[in-house]
Amino acid sequence: MAKARKIKQALSDTRKRYIARLVIRCLILIASVFVLIFSPSQFSVLNGAGFFTEFSVFHILWAIWVGDMICQLIPIKKKIPLGSQKLFSAHFKPIREKINHETLRAYIISTTRSAYKVFVIWAIMLFVLGALYYTGVISPVFLFMTSITFYVCDLICVLVWCPFRLIMKNKCCTTCRIFNWDHLMMLTPMIFINGFYSVSLVALSFAVWVVWEVCVMMYPERFWEGSNVALQCSSCTDKLCTQYCRKLRG
């Protein structure tokens, strides 16, 4: 009991919020399955201009996704993980000594190569989904439910285990090279659906991705803990790290 109490007290506010968000996302997935079974007509919001014809519970989910992505495009100092906000100058705390630009360049090149290995794997997955969709094996609703499933998996990656670490080799989400790729990866299964609902979400997620990638190239020092003190374990307040680096919490 004492050990369990100690672990509970060690949870950061950010991690607590993420656990709550994971529970909410699981409930959204369960609710979507119920809608699929008992009120499938609500999925008409996905078709063409169906977004504007009648209200669906999925309008609420659309607003949540849009709001989350807008938060990734503007600097916010509180309640948003540093891993998502490190592209902004407000979260850059330069080291006292001179930055080793050769090492920084090598780091960015290495992590970018790893990032685009993930990108290729994701592109292959999308190709398979597209092939299944255009051959009539799966429907727009299946693609939408896939995105909602990935919505849940996104926080499982943060809180439990992330398969992309096997490729990225990053120690935690705060230092992750692809942190703000989350919505692009979640929402791109809907890229094949011809409707405002999907097009608007995929387009905004692509804009978030572009901004992130441009900042990596223009301000690489913000993304490396060797040049940005804010990313170092000693400065961490998010405490989103899992079993991979709990020993570094200190």
Image: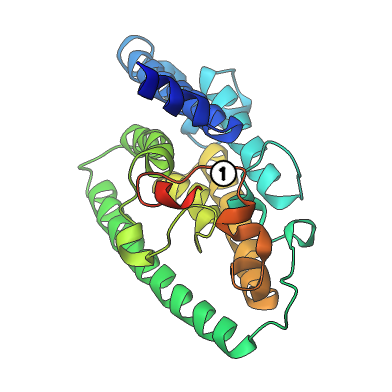
Q: Is residue 163 left or right of residue 29?
A: left
Q: Position of residue 215 (x, y in %)?
A: 67, 69
Decide which of 204, 16 is in the foreground and name it: 16
Residue ranking furthest to the right: 90
Decide which of 3, 212 is in the foreground and name it: 3
Q: Give the quadrant of residue 64.
A: top right
Q: Position of residue 54 (x, y in %)?
A: 59, 18
Residue identifier under label 1: 201
Task: Please name the residue shown 35% across and 15% down the image.
Answer: 1
Q: Is residue 217 left or right of residue 239?
A: right
Decide which of 176, 200 is in the foreground and name it: 176
Task: Please name the residue shown 35% across and 34% down the image.
Answer: 149
Task: Please name the residue shown 63% across and 30% down the image.
Answer: 63
Amino acid identity at mark 1 = Leu
Q: Is residue 96 left or right of residue 163?
A: right
Image height of 130 relative to 168, above or below = above
Image height of 40 relative to 152, above or below = above
Q: Position of residue 227 (x, y in %)?
A: 65, 73
